């Protein structure tokens, strides 16, 4: 029968676990910092050759909408609506892409969102 030579004290490799904990804490702090920076960022997009411009925050909230008066045609309100939607959606895509790029730094490019994480 094999005899266990462990006599108490720290388990072998315990220093590695502490190092991993420190790295995880550092990564968490960096992720929080990146999240704060993202929330302060602004993402702008335009449509219709620049006649409609939308700005969203990193929180994905519309913060500014500029419409050139020349884009307002009472006979074609649908066109203006389409331009607003296009500009807002593109600004939101830019915010989402920036967030994904920031997270990729921490996940090594893994798509954790598809795993529900």
Image (cartoon, grey):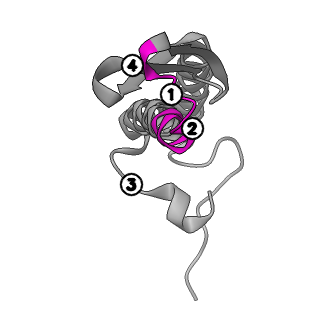
Q: Mark 1 = which residue?
A: 73
Separation (CA) of disc 4 from disc 3: 38 Å
- Compared with 70, 94 (above or below) is below
Is residue 92 found left or right of 28 in the rendered image?
Answer: left
Look at the image and tell me whether residue 68 can be seen. no
Locate residue 45, reporting x and y percent: 40, 24
Q: Residue placed at 49% from the left, 39% from the top?
A: 16
Looking at marks 1 and 3 on the same chain, the residue that comes earlier in the sequence is marked by 1
State the mark number for residue 77.
Answer: 2
Looking at marks 4 and 3 on the same chain, the residue that comes earlier in the sequence is marked by 4
Q: Residues within 10 Å of mark 4 (few under 14, many from 20)?
A: some
State the mark number for residue 51.
Answer: 4
Q: Mark 3 = which residue?
A: 110
Which residues, given as a range, are shown in magenta?
Answer: 70-84
Q: Nearer the viewer, residue 27 or 89?
A: 89
Separation (CA) of disc 2 from disc 3: 43 Å
Q: Nearer the viewer, residue 23 or 91?
A: 91
Looking at marks 2 and 3 on the same chain, the residue that comes earlier in the sequence is marked by 2
Q: Residues within 10 Å of mark 3 (few under 14, many from 20)?
A: few
| Secondary structure mostly seen in the magenta stretch | helix
Q: Which SS class for mark 1?
A: loop
Q: Residue placed at 65% from the left, 41% from the top?
A: 10
Q: Residues within 10 Å of mark 1 (few under 14, many from 20)?
A: few
Q: Which SS class for mark 3?
A: loop
């Amino acid at each position: 029968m094999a005899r266990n030579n462990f006599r108490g004290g720290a388990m072998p490799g315990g220093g590695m676990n502490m190092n991993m904990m420190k790295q995880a804490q550092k990564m968490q702090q960096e992720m929080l910092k990146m999240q704060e920076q993202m929330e302060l960022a602004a993402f702008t997009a335009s449509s219709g050759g620049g006649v409609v411009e939308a700005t969203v925050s990193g929180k994905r909230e519309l913060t500014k909408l500029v419409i050139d008066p020349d884009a307002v045609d009472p006979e074609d309100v649908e066109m203006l609506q389409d331009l607003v939607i296009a500009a807002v959606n593109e600004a939101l895509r830019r915010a989402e892409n920036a967030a994904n790029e920031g997270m990729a730094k921490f996940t090594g490019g893994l798509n954790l969102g598809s795993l529900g994480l």
